Amino acid sequence: MSVRELILEPKLPPEEIKRLEVSQPWISSNGDPERYMLISDCWELPGMFIDETCSARDKVTGGMIFHLLRGVLQPREYKLPWDYLRSGGTPVSGSSRGRTVGQGDPEHQDQDATERVIGFMNRQGGRFQYARRTGWTQDYEKEYRAVQPFIQHLDQLARLFAPGEWAEQWAAAQQRPEYVMVGTAFSTGTVNLGIRCRPHRDKGNLCLSAMTVTDLSPAPVQGGELLLPEYLCSISIRNEDVLIFDGRALHATAQFFTTSSPSLVHGVQRLSCIFYYRAGLAKCLPPDEELRRAQQRMAANW
Ligand SMILES: [Fe+2]
C-alpha cells in the first residue's frame, strides 16, 4: 500500500486552541470535499478533507497525528461491531462525558443516542476506586468475545503502520497484562451509536488509538467526519477503513445529516468504535488485589 505522507502544522493560534478546548463550541463542516470548510462559533475557515490512505505527522514535534488506512477491513470484519456492539449502552442523558457529548443540548445531540465502554477501566474517583472490567463487558460477555477478532485485527494494523508507537504502548500494557484486551496493545474501547462530540482531547490514554466507523443501515447518515481543528483538517472514515490516531490531539465530530434532514437527525445508526490504552491500568494491582483493596475501602466507609 503506497502511503501519502503529510506534515501538518497548527493552523490556529494557541489562544484559539485553548478557547476551543475550554468552551467546547460545536464544530461543523459544509460537507463539500471540493470546497471544504470548518465552521465554529467564531470562524469559518477552509479545511483539508482527507478521504484517501495517508499518514500525518506534526511539523513541530514530529509526532504521529494519524494514519488513515482505506479499505483494510472486509465485510465479515466490520459486521462484527455492527452485530455485537450496538447492544445495551448508556444514553447521552446518562453519560459521564457530559458537555463533550452534548448532554442537555437536544438541539445538537440526540439525547437517546448511546455509548458503551468495553474492556477494562482504571481506578477513578467516586465509587470506582479500583481497576475493573466495565459494566458493559460483564453484562455482554458473549458479545465482547464475538468482537475479539475485530479488535485483534485493528491491533495488527496499528502494529504494522505505527510500529514505534505500538511497541511503546504494548510494552506499557504488558506491565499488567490482566487488563489488556486479548493480547493487543488496547485495554479499552468506547463505542458510540449516533453520538457526536464537541472538541476535546482523550485524557488518560497513551498515544495510540484505533477508530472505525460502521453504518450498515439502509440509509446511512452522511457527515460525521473526525475533525482536527488545530490542523483545520477532517477525516472521512468509511465502513472498510481504519484510523490510527493520537487521541490526545484536539478532535471533534462534524454534524450528521441526511438529504432529507439537514438539521439534527434522531436515531442515527452510525457506530464509531475507538480502542485505546488507559495509562492508569499499568500502575494498578492484579485483579484479586484490586478487589481486596476495594473491599477494604468499602469496609472502612461502613
Ligand atoms: Fe475522543
Image (cartoon, rainbow, N blue to C red):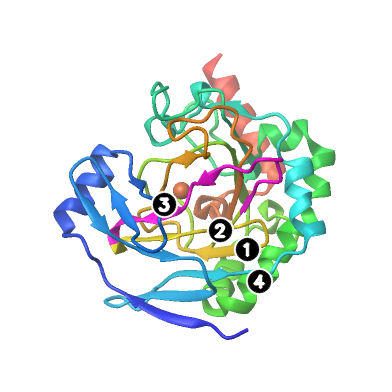
Q: Which residue is mark 4?
A: 157
As shown in the figure, which amino acid type bears the numbered disc 4? Leu
Q: Residue at x 58, y 75 (%)?
A: 167
Q: Quadrant of the N terminus?
A: bottom right
Q: Is residue 214 magenta?
A: yes
Magenta-colored span: 213-230
Q: Are marks 3 and 1 in contact (CB under 8 Å)?
A: no
User: Which circle's residue, 4 or 2, is located before the other in the chain?
Assistant: 4
| Mark drawn on residue 241 | 1
Total labels drawn: 4
Query: Which residue bears the numbered disc 3?
Result: 31
Residue 92 or residue 120, whichever sits in front: 92
**Tag nearer the camera, 4 or 1:** 1
Give percent across and percent down for residue 112.
56, 23
The answer to whether mark 4 and mark 2 are in CB contact below 8 A is no
Labels 2 and 1 touching (C-beta < 8 A): yes
Disc 4 or disc 3, which is closer to the eye? 3
